Image: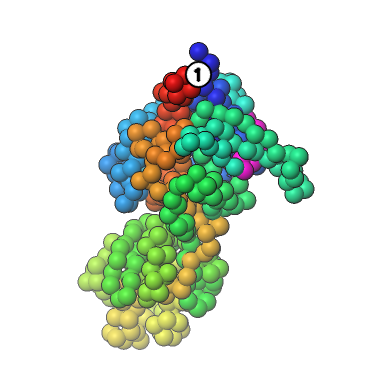
Amino acid sequence: MPKKKIIIIGAGASGLTAAGTAAVSGAEVILVEKMNIPGKKLRITGKGRCNITNIAGIRDFIEHFGKNGKFLRQAFSFFFNTELVQFLNTLGVNTVTERGGRVFPGSNDANEVTDALVQWNKKEGVKIRTNTKADKLLTDSNRITGVEIVTVTTAETDKQNKEIIKADAVILASGGASYPGTGSTGDGYSLAKSAGHSVIPVRPALIPLDTEGDTASHLEGLSLKNINVSLWINDKKNSEEFGEMVFTSRGVSGPVILTLSKTCVDSIYNKDKVFISIDLKPALDHKALDSRLIRDISSSPTKTAKNLLKGLLPERLIAVCLDQIKLNPDKTANQITAEERKKLRLWLKDFRLKVTGHRPLKEAIITAGGVDVREINPRTMESKIINGLYFAGEIIDIDADTGGYNLQAAFSTGRLAGISAASDDSITEKENDESA
Ligand SMILES: Cc1cc2nc3c(=O)[nH]c(=O)nc-3n(C[C@H](O)[C@H](O)[C@H](O)COP(=O)(O)OP(=O)(O)OC[C@H]3O[C@@H](n4cnc5c(N)ncnc54)[C@H](O)[C@@H]3O)c2cc1C
């Protein structure tokens, strides 16, 4: 029985998983990666710490992926978070679980995870060809037959570098279109389209937002913890998130903002009126906060307003607060009027920033849109259009919040695509076709 020959396009989280899995399942596997090393994006995930997965259940995972979450049910059922952690343990990567159920390597080093996957691929006999770009999918009568590749040189690629590799199956695991410096430049979308697939327009998800004026730039680098941020669209509260955010030179970022950003991006395209409201004291309702302010004022009547606020706000936020509520910083606490105290309370519960835009796709943590899930078999990850063509990872129209969900999807779909592609069904079908 000849070995099934499989080409995997892209050595990211999904491609490395698919390639190793296919090799373990008995296939001859070539993994082509256009960058000079595998896993460039994986190496920078989780700020270099790699939030591998989350301990949440399948139902929670599916919810985090929104409307296309159900597409992932079979892939998750096949290879989920406990299997991933066990598998990484067998490769020598220990893990720790942190706040919010986020799982990281014990070493806090994304390179450890990436290198372990690369070594596993090599051990299982996967031929990894770096500096090799997949340029064209070759098909015949709705069946994949191979891939045309070009060797990436420092000069422009030329015809001499082209090569055709024949294959029984191809797994397209070329990622999204964000952080192009890692190699994820959206090539896979054109490859998929050339094979007849529909691609849902790509746009940024998990993206920092731009805000009006210079408030954010004055606060650049300031991180706020345990705050509640609400997203308001056309004066209606759309959603809210509790957690952490950070100010940037142009606006806002951090976990809470990234989670709210997908809805924001769609609203910005619709030209809706969008603002965020930060509740800096979510643990206190208005009544409790007012009592707290009265207590602070009466216990330190001669303190200036700016010193009084030190107990309530980070230093850098004090000037912004006093400026916005127009309270003289040198006014003593006992001179603060009831009206001024009310303004202060309202501001602490509702610090608003108008959202004017979002950072470009290249800065997104994840790409929304991609190959239409209706054209992929969720049980195998095989294309419903081209036999022998499979998809894995971010190239598919799936995207979730931060928390390890996106990488788990890449690992799960990679595993399922790898095992499905290596199964003998399609090669047997092909042999039957040929003998007929
Ligand atoms: C800064 C950052 C931090 C993140 N942190 C986390 C996190 O902590 N946890 C989490 O769950 N998710 C995180 N993500 C998201 C996560 O990294 C991605 O969802 C995941 O890496 C997708 O894996 P993939 O294999 O589908 O694609 P990628 O990792 O993008 O890999 C695709 C590979 O294909 C190669 N390629 C592309 N085109 C071709 C071609 N034509 N020929 C050959 N090779 C090609 C690329 O060079 C690339 O190596 C983060 C993303 C970013 C940008």
Q: Percent from the top left, x then y, of residue 370?
A: 45, 50
In the rendered image, the vertical position of residue 425 relative to residue 209, given as above or below: above
Query: Which residue corresponds to the image point at 52% horizontal and 35% vertical from the top-left?
Result: 140
Magenta-drawn stretch, dominant element (helix, strand or loop): strand
Query: Which residue corresponds to the image point at 62% horizontal and 26% vertical from the top-left?
Result: 127
Q: Which residue is mark 1?
A: 26
In the rendered image, the vertical position of residue 156 relative to residue 24, given as above or below: below
Query: Which residue corresponds to the image point at 28% horizontal and 72% vertical from the top-left?
Result: 236
Name the foreground residue: 282 vs 90. Answer: 90
In the rendered image, the vertical position of residue 130 relative to residue 275, given as above or below: above
Magenta residues (range): 128-135
Q: Is residue 293 left or right of residue 121?
A: left
- Asked whether 272 falls inside the magenta stretch, the response is no
- Asked whether 133 falls inside the magenta stretch, the response is yes
Q: Percent from the top left, x then y, of residue 143?
A: 48, 34
Residue type at the position of mark 1: Gly
In the rendered image, the vertical position of residue 79 relative to residue 153, given as above or below: above
State the SS at label 1.
loop
Dot 1 beta carbon under 8 Å from ligand 1:
no
Give the quarter of the image for residue 135. top right
Residue 351 shows in the view: no
Query: Which residue corresponds to the image point at 46% horizontal and 28% vertical from the top-left?
Result: 421
Q: How is the image coloured?
A: rainbow
Name the foreground residue: 417 vs 95. Answer: 417
Q: Percent from the top left, x then y, of residue 354?
A: 42, 75
Q: Percent from the top left, x then y, of residue 173?
A: 51, 40
Give the quarter of the image for residue 243. bottom left
Q: Is residue 26 left or right of residue 381?
A: right
Name the foreground residue: 225 vs 67. Answer: 67
Instruction: Give the residue furthest to the left.
Output: 287
Residue 270 shows in the view: yes
